[in-house]
Image (tube, helix red, strand yellow):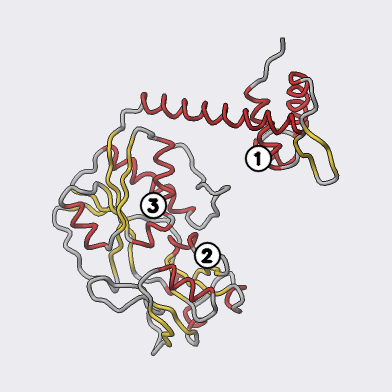
Amino acid sequence: MAEFTLVGLRVMVEVARTGSFSAAAESLGYTQSAVSRQVAATERTASVPLFERHARGVRPTAAGEALVRHAARVLDALSAAGQELAGMRDQLAGRLGVGGFPTAMAVLVPRAVAQLQVEHPGIDVRLTEAPTPALLTAVRRGRLQVAVVAVGAGLPDYDLTDLELHVLVGGPGAGVAVCESSPLASSARLTPEDLREQTWIAGPQSTDRPEFDAWPGLTAPRIAHRAKDWPTRLGLVAAGIGIALVPGIAAGAVPRGVRWVPVTREGELGRHLCVATRGRPTPAAEAMTGAIRRQLPRITEPWDHGRPRVESS
């Protein structure tokens, strides 16, 4: 008696998800003919038609929907088994405290954690969002093993006693968040000169928790509103009330109705993104730092079906 194959089940699920053989082939890295053969073989095993062909692609029959439902469970179970076995082989395990300031926690740190979970599923990451001074204190006291912080122009001279700073390079520079209906939204890149007549949404003025203001170097910029939290700031931007300075590491977190546009390198903020550890990092902390480094260059890329694209080391 013929049996279902894992390849056939995986193809079934992908064809049902995408609605066409060609789209499933592209997603899986197969040829369209290979997808067609797998579907045909699975239909022979099932002894019933599994897809209906129509003008815009295919859709599962009632039998196809039932098989796809069960196939998805089988594939999920196998994936979970693989991760559990990988965790048993992995030398790295245990709890790891990781922190970041709010803009780092918007996209970069979550994607790096997803990368780490693929590579080292035995590591139990516990996340903390806090301002840089609090993060540095937590690392110094051993409550965190890794913290993503920012240092440089416009920021205080933080106490780095007993800490190691690992500078991150290769990420996007700063830019601005603008309403999609703004003339600025059609630009591939802006210059500081383009920003001189703009109205700004800024963070609160605070010496102990410096927030982003208007673009540095502008003379008497117009600040329409100041808001503590990023969702409020970006909501004001989406409403067309002003624009906001947003680091590239948070570009992927702008909401619908807002576009992030990079600003030329001549307008850099003079700040450096770093990973802070206490002394020599543990192997788990080194693995987390490596994941952060690998995700940084692709931070402005879109998420793949709601999940970050990850890669093996």
Callout 1: helix, strand or loop? helix
Question: What residue did someone put label 1 on?
Answer: 27
Per the image, the residue denoted by label 3 is 109
For the image, the number of numbered tags is 3
- The answer to whether 130 appears left or right of 35 in the picture is left
The reply, left or right, for residue 278 in relation to residue 75 is left
Name which of mark 3 and mark 2 comes first in the sequence.
3
Residues tagged 3 and 2 counted as in contact (Cβ below 8 A): no
Residue ID at (39%, 88%): 219
Q: Quadrant of residue 62?
A: top right
Q: Residue 86 placed where, x, y %?
A: 41, 27
For the residues marked 3 and 2, what is the alpha-carbon distance in whole angstroms?
18 Å
Q: Disc 3 versus disc 1: distance between alpha carbons?
A: 26 Å
CA gap, disc 1 and disc 2: 26 Å
- How dense is the environment of label 3, judged by Cα within 10 Å: few (below 14), some, or many (20 and up)? many
The first of marks 3 and 1 along the sequence is 1
Residue positioned 41% across, 24% down in the render: 85
Horizontal relation, residue 56 to residue 162: left or right: right
Q: Secondary structure at mark 2?
A: loop
Q: Amino acid at mark 2?
A: Pro
Q: Is residue 138 above or below residue 19?
A: below
Circle 2 Cα neighbour tier, 10 Å, few/some/many (<14 / 14–19 / ≥20): some
Q: Quadrant of the C terminus?
A: top left
Residue 83 appearing in the image? yes
Residue positioned 41% across, 82% down in the render: 225
> What's the residue at 43%, 53% (across, down)?
296
Q: Position of residue 262 (x, y in %)?
A: 50, 69
Q: Amino acid at mark 1?
A: Ser
Q: Secondary structure at mark 3?
A: helix
Compared to 262, does 86 lie above or below?
above
The residue wearing badge 2 is 255
Q: Amino acid at mark 3?
A: Val
